[in-house]
């Protein structure tokens, strides 16, 4: 499903992202020409910023058609311009073929569906190739990262945190690496949660190869995301840059176990640079894989002991995203509500989102704590769907949760 | 040995403590009458502040002789005044008998030998009973505290940190309790280091009784300190107040393992209130005895992984104490040097302390790193004595240590 099928196209683009995209609000579906132009821009390589600038105010096809003088004004270098004039036909053909398959998407910088949290980072990629449910790039997410060879306890913690955070409605993002990443993805899938893998290879190239099966399962149940063209193999320099996407898509990054010099620490620092929450699990001083976490904590990362700690830390950031999310994902077409930040005095409880599932859940909730089984029985909705709506309601301050039971807070 | 035998009496009182004690600088040995008066004041009980005020500017005997109108001006309450007029003869007699034994001391608030770090705390005791080497109350010290029933790893960590910190020249203070306290005292003694036990009972009452032998060993090799009269039994309310002395005597407090509600956390908070360093060892999130430590770290305590971390954190506080210490303990009688803070431009290296051991060590040190065995061979001094002098030299910035090897830094 293309995210634009899911995101009602009549909606205005979320207003908080501050990108001038007025020329694009007439349609949220890229034309074939735009997709082709965007692929050429991706394939031209080099610094992303001039290429982002080129399509910030214009659709990709129009931006390319504007020609070399405009390319030059936007700062494209000689080799980028040469690549645009003489594209590698086989590469483009392969990318088109990949995109033609079901569940494969390309989200460009110019597009209102470009993930809002990633847009607000210092070095956002020009475009994302997505295999699977692209809407997940908009969900409140937490990155769970760590050592490629964790201790057994580290592996268990990765799984346990992933399970609990997924059950609470968060998407679990990670890097498909061995060890902690694998444990986090796997536990989320097993628990029926949502997981996103961000790759340093092309979206169709599992790395390590041993995660072939996990890659396929994530494509089927969640989403695999990459800034690299389909077919791109593993290259050492792509993994740190992959980490900036992982950090940028997520409200926060949780480091489970990490040696003193570890890729997970890079992800954590990139998360801090984006203003996201950085969290680390402490460990015994006798565990060398706790060193990296301890270093992060000393440098200001939050020490977390439980998934509840993570939820509490992410709530303020998630609340900011919730307005955008509700507008774009959940709000009723007939009753869009005021845009976030306009300070309407109306109580949210008086205007529950018009979505029928929201209404059903709101009516099933009382001021006495009610557990998930009761809510399932009363609404007929799945626990996953209920969790997702409950998370939004919690973030909006309408619902409180205590020991797995939920009640109206007003 | 009474500390006044050790501290050269011709020295001025350290200038940094800011207490008006000019009336007392003519002598640093209490008269029998002063000791008797101080014991009466201790035995009168009640709030310490009025009693401290009474002897801040006057010797205890003179202060008591000044009579009720002066007692009243200093804020002594009715029951305190009654107790001063009608003292319990048996209690006083027992205290005198205890003090008459070798190695037993009483350090009053009025006296220049009152421990300088403790003097600078919000609620210093009126007087300290000391059994053993009272000079240790002046040494740079670190408190090592924690659970009464630690995990085996916690017990090992307490011992390992105590050993290393004692070998680095720090005095290890603790509370003689079971568990972490016992491990810290025991390891320090075994390593030939200096340890001080601060009790919530009288100085002659081991608590728990199972630590009878440890109590005796600390009296023989280190010092036992209490604000309570000899013979005072264990009372629940005395243990938190004991912790303020433990924290106040120490440059910092290190918590090894502690449950969520633990006496060690009280000591840590009292240390923070005194402006001392609070340090905690992290642990696995599956270890309930790491909870208290994690809570402290979240509240701002330093996460430490090694004894070197502790040394690094204590160095700035120790450096402030070092000036006082050198003046009072280590500086040559013939060459007292400028008082701390007067900003003499002379290089310390040009004026090494006149103590012959200092001179010998300074000559044995070069600009190439030299290990302890070589220093022992060159100077004929014990490793313990060398460690102690090296610590002072390090704190003064004259010596640097790297991987257990020492060299002149200028």
Image: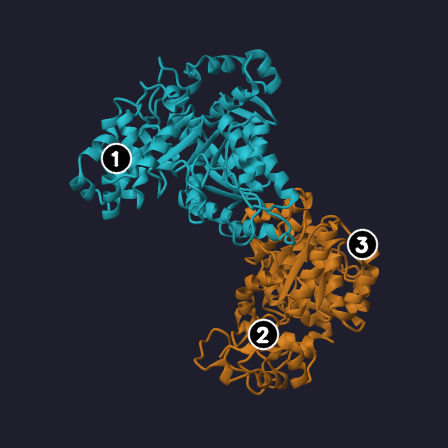
Chain colours: A orange, B cyan
What residue appears at the point 60 percent right and 36 percent down from the top-left corner? B159
Q: Chain of mark 1?
A: B
Res A380 visible: yes
Q: Chain of mark 3?
A: A
Residue that badge 2 annotates: A392
Q: CA distance from mark 3 to mark 2?
A: 35 Å
Q: Which mark is residue B55?
A: 1
What residue appears at the point 64 percent right and 52 percent down from the top-left corner? B287
Query: Residue B246: x and y, percent?
Result: 45, 39
Residue that badge 3 annotates: A208
Q: Relative to the observer, which residue lies in front, A137 or B143?
A: B143
Q: Residues within 10 Å of mark 1 (few under 14, many from 20)?
A: many
Q: Tag 2, which secondary structure?
A: helix
Q: CA distance from mark 1 to mark 2?
A: 65 Å
Q: CA distance from mark 3 to mark 1?
A: 76 Å
Residue A377 falls left or right of residue A276: right
Q: Relative to the observer, which residue lies in front, B62 or B114?
A: B62
Is the residue B344 above or below the residue A377 in the image? above
Whether callout 3 and callout 2 share a subunit is answered yes
What residue appears at the point 74 percent right and 48 percent down from the top-left corner? A236
Q: Quadrant of the N terminus of chain A?
A: bottom right
Query: Residue B372: x and y, percent?
Result: 59, 20
Give the label, 3 or 2, closer to the camera. 2
Q: Residues within 10 Å of mark 3 (few under 14, many from 20)?
A: few
What residue appears at the point 64 percent right and 50 percent down from the top-left corner? B284
Q: Tag 3, which secondary structure?
A: loop
Query: Residue B263: x and y, percent?
Result: 49, 48
Query: Quadrant location of residue A52?
Result: bottom right
Is the residue A385 above or below the residue A82 in the image? below
Res A226 visible: no
Is the residue A385 above or below the residue B189 in the image? below
Q: Chain of mark 2?
A: A
């Amino acid at each position: 499903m293309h995210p634009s099928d899911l995101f009602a196209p009549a909606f205005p683009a979320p207003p908080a992202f501050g990108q001038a995209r007025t020329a694009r609000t007439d349609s949220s579906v890229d034309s074939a020409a735009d997709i082709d132009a965007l692929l050429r821009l991706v394939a031209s390589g080099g610094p992303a910023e001039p290429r982002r600038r080129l399509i910030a105010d214009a659709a990709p096809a129009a931006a390319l058609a504007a020609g070399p003088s405009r390319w030059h004004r936007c700062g494209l270098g000689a080799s980028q311009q040469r690549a645009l004039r003489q594209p590698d036909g086989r590469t483009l053909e392969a990318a088109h073929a990949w995109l033609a398959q079901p569940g494969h998407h390309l989200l460009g910088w110019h597009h209102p569906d470009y993930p809002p949290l990633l847009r607000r980072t210092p070095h956002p990629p020009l475009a994302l190739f997505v295999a699977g449910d692209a809407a997940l790039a908009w969900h409140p997410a937490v990155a769970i990262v760590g050592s490629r060879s964790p201790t057994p306890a580290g592996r268990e913690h990765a799984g346990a945190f992933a399970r609990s955070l997924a059950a609470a409605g968060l998407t679990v993002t990670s890097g498909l690496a061995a060890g902690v990443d694998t444990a986090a993805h796997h536990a989320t899938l097993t628990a029926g949660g949502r997981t996103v893998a961000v790759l340093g290879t092309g979206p169709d190239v599992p790395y390590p190869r041993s995660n072939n099966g996990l890659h396929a399962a994530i494509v089927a149940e969640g989403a695999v995301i990459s800034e690299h063209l389909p077919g791109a193999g593993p290259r050492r320099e792509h993994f740190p840059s992959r980490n900036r996407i992982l950090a940028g898509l997520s409200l926060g990054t949780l480091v489970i176990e990490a040696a003193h010099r570890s890729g997970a620490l890079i992800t954590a620092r990139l998360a801090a640079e984006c203003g996201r929450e950085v969290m680390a699990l402490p460990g015994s001083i006798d565990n060398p894989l706790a060193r990296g976490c301890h270093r992060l904590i000393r440098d200001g990362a939050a020490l977390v002991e439980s998934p509840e700690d993570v939820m509490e830390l992410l709530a303020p950031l998630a609340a900011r995203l919730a307005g955008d999310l509700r507008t774009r994902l959940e709000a009723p077409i007939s009753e869009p509500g005021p845009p976030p930040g306009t300070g309407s005095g109306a109580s949210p409880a008086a205007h529950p989102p018009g979505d029928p599932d929201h209404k059903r859940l709101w009516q099933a909730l009382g001021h006495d704590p009610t557990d998930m089984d009761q809510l399932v029985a009363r609404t007929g909705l799945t626990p996953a769907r209920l969790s997702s709506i409950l998370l939004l309601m919690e973030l909006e301050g309408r619902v409180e949760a205590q020991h797995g039971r939920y009640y109206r807070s007003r």
